[in-house]
Each structure stands twice: as structure tokens, then as C-alpha cells.
């Protein structure tokens, strides 16, 4: 049996004919297995969806009650038989509920890892290494220049700036699902106890995190707070709001942006970001290459991002590797936010 007999790459996502399902399909299909709730992976309109409870809940929050014909929750580590294949979900360490999907048939094991990171994150279960024959990896930051470094150090920069400018507000752009809650949790871990303010667009998802037992301390809506109240405080907002009229309610704001892309100075400048914070929910170059090697897989399939560099790296290690060319995976979670303005009255 060849890996392609288990999973076939198609333009809309990988397909398991044996089990009758697609993983993270970019167009509506009969049965979808979803790695995590970011909108480029989790779309509405599938017949049946199998995903972790958190991913199903987050999809419901975003798309409404009828986001799929039927749903089935998957527990980490629990095998499910689908046709001639067995599938198991394991933590991917990317955002709350994120999973790698392991597909096995006839003694061959393929891992579709979705988006992942192998560094600690107080807001989700840690990445679990699953030895396999074929590893499907993302490549969002697959260039040697991308080394994310220490997220706690970036939070220390933010808190230093807050201490330095007690009369100014600090606005931190962060993607609404995952990044925002991780940044808040890291700020708390650093010992900051004052209320943290939220843009309205992140309220629902953040409330959901709290309902799942993620401690985020006192949170307040930025909406309705006076300029005086906002002096010396931290507010989290979608990146798109950073250059919006919405910022006028804040006293002389210092603008930050928490993203792996902040490693690239030009990107920070382009967004007028004064305080770039290199914090990413994706594996960096070292994370990707270490993980690939550790899985023991002899064959690597590479999706979304810098496929070429990673495919080349694999070849130098004697690993068989190919890019998957699936259309429609962006990196919503690391996006610049353009065309994605989440309005708040
Ligand atoms: Zn993602
Ligand atoms: Zn992705």
C-alpha cells in the first residue's frame, strides 16, 4: 500500500477515499475532519463534521447553529473507525482545540498536522509528537530567517513600554482566535494584574476560552471606556483595527502587533507598528525541522506558505518530500488583517 492509497492530495484538501472524508476541505464536502477552527481550515456547509468539541464550539460561535449537517466530537487519543481507515486526533499546540489528525490503514500511518507549534502555550494542550510514515506539515514560517524566540521576552517589552508611558494607552493587534487569548495569558503570567481591555470583535471567542477554564484575569470592553480610564492600560484588538478611526478613543496610543511576521521589520513599518511583538502560533524554522525529523517519517508533504524551502531541506536529509498545492489555505491567524475589518460600534 502507498500513502496515496490512504490520503490523496486534491486541490480542495487531502481526501481519504477508504474512509470517505476530506481533511480541512476548502469547499463543502459530504464528510469533513477539521484540525482547528481558523477560517481557512474550518469552513461552513459540510454534510458531516468530525472535530474536537472546542473546534465544533468555535465553529458554531463563528458560523451559527447550522454550520454543518451533523457534527461528531472527537476526543484526543480516541480512535474512530471510518470505512477502512482509523482516525485519531492528537493535540497540535496551535490554538484551543487544535488537533493533528492521524489516519491509519493497513499498517501505514499518515499524520495531517494542520497548523502547529511545539512551544508551550497556556491556552491550549501541548503539541504531541506522533511517530508516522508520512507527515503532512504546514510551512507558514518555513525559512531560516524565522526564529520566533521567546514569547515571554516579547511580553516583557510590552510591559516595559506600559510602565514607561503611564499616560498613554497600549493597543496590541492580535488575531481574535488564539493569539489574543494567548497574549492575555502571557501578560498575566508575567504578573500584570490590572484589567485588560478588549475590542468587541474578540469578546465572544475570549468568553469561550474563559468558559473552558483558561484563566485570563479581569477583562473589560474598550467600548464605552473614557480616555482617562484608558490611560496606562492595555487593549487587545484585531490587527485591522490598528489603523482604524476606532483608535481615536485612546489617549496617544502606542501600537503593537503580536505576530510571527513582526520578525520582518518592513512588515511592522508597513502597518505603522511601533511595538512589534514576535509571537506566533506557528512553528518557526527550527520548530518545523525538529518536528519533521522527530516524527521519523520518511515522506513529508508540505502545505501553505514557504513550501519550497522546506521541501529542499527535506531533500538534503534524504527525505522524500512534495508540496501539496492546496488552494485556499492562507494564514488567517497571522494575516495582516486587510479586508478583514471587524467593526465595532
Ligand atoms: Zn491556524
Ligand atoms: Zn493554516
Image: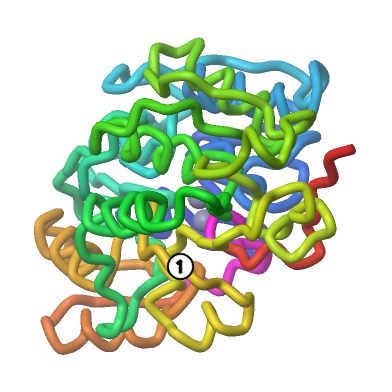
User: Per the image, is 326 magenta?
Assistant: yes
User: Per the image, is 330 magenta?
Assistant: yes
Q: Which residues are magenta?
A: 324-334
- Give the percent coordinates (x, y) of residue 116: 35, 50
Above or below 152: residue 329: below
- Give the percent coordinates (x, y) of residue 125: 29, 29
Q: Secondary structure at mark 1?
A: strand
Residue 237 visible in this rendered orientation of the protein: yes
Q: Quadrant of the C terminus?
A: top right
Q: For label 1, count other residues whose C-alpha is less than 10 Å away and answer few (under 14), some (14-19) or many (20+).
A: many
| Way the structure is coloured | rainbow
Q: Which residue is mark 1?
A: 275
Which one is nearer the viewer's eye here, 191 or 15? 191
Q: Is residue 220 left or right of residue 191?
A: right
State the residue at coordinates (51%, 61%): 256
Which one is nearer the viewer's eye here, 144 or 255? 255
Count up the numbered dots. Answer: 1
Above or below 55: residue 210: above
Residue 103 visible in this rendered orientation of the protein: no
Amino acid at each position: 500500500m502507498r500513502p496515496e492509497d490512504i490520503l490523496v492530495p486534491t486541490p480542495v484538501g487531502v481526501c481519504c477515499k477508504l474512509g470517505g472524508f476530506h481533511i480541512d476541505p476548502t469547499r463543502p464536502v459530504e464528510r469533513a475532519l477539521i484540525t482547528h477552527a481558523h477560517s481557512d481550515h474550518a469552513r461552513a456547509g459540510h454534510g458531516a463534521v468530525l472535530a474536537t468539541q472546542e473546534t465544533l464550539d468555535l465553529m458554531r460561535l463563528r458560523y451559527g447553529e447550522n454550520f454543518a449537517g451533523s457534527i461528531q466530537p472527537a476526543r484526543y487519543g480516541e480512535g474512530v473507525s471510518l470505512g477502512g481507515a482509523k482516525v485519531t486526533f492528537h493535540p497540535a499546540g496551535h490554538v484551543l482545540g487544535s488537533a493533528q489528525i492521524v489516519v491509519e490503514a493497513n499498517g501505514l500511518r499518515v499524520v495531517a498536522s494542520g497548523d502547529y507549534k511545539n512551544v508551550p502555550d497556556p491556552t491550549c494542550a501541548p503539541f504531541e509528537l506522533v511517530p508516522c510514515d508520512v507527515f503532512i506539515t504546514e510551512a507558514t514560517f518555513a525559512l531560516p530567517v524565522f526564529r520566533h524566540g521567546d514569547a515571554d521576552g516579547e511580553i516583557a517589552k510590552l510591559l516595559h513600554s506600559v510602565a514607561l508611558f503611564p499616560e498613554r494607552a497600549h493597543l496590541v493587534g492580535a488575531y481574535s482566535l488564539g493569539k489574543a487569548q494567548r497574549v492575555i495569558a502571557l501578560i498575566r503570567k508575567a504578573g500584570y494584574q490590572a484589567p485588560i481591555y478588549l475590542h468587541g470583535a474578540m469578546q465572544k471567542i475570549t468568553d469561550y476560552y474563559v468558559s473552558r477554564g483558561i484563566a485570563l484575569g479581569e477583562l473589560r470592553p474598550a467600548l464605552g471606556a473614557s480616555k482617562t480610564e484608558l490611560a496606562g492600560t492595555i487593549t487587545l484588538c484585531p490587527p485591522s483595527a490598528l489603523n482604524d478611526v476606532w483608535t481615536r478613543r485612546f489617549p496617544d496610543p502606542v501600537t503593537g502587533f503580536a505576530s510571527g511576521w513582526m520578525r520582518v521589520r518592513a512588515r511592522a513599518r508597513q502597518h505603522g507598528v511601533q511595538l512589534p511583538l514576535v509571537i506566533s502560533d506557528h512553528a518557526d524554522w527550527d520548530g518545523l525541522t525538529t518536528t519533521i525529523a522527530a516524527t521519523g517519517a520518511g515522506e513529508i508533504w508540505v502545505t501553505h506558505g514557504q513550501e519550497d524551502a522546506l521541501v529542499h531541506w527535506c531533500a538534503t536529509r534524504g527525505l522524500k518530500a512534495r508540496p501539496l498545492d492546496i488552494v485556499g489555505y492562507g494564514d488567517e491567524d497571522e494575516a495582516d488583517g486587510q479586508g478583514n475589518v471587524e467593526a465595532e460600534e
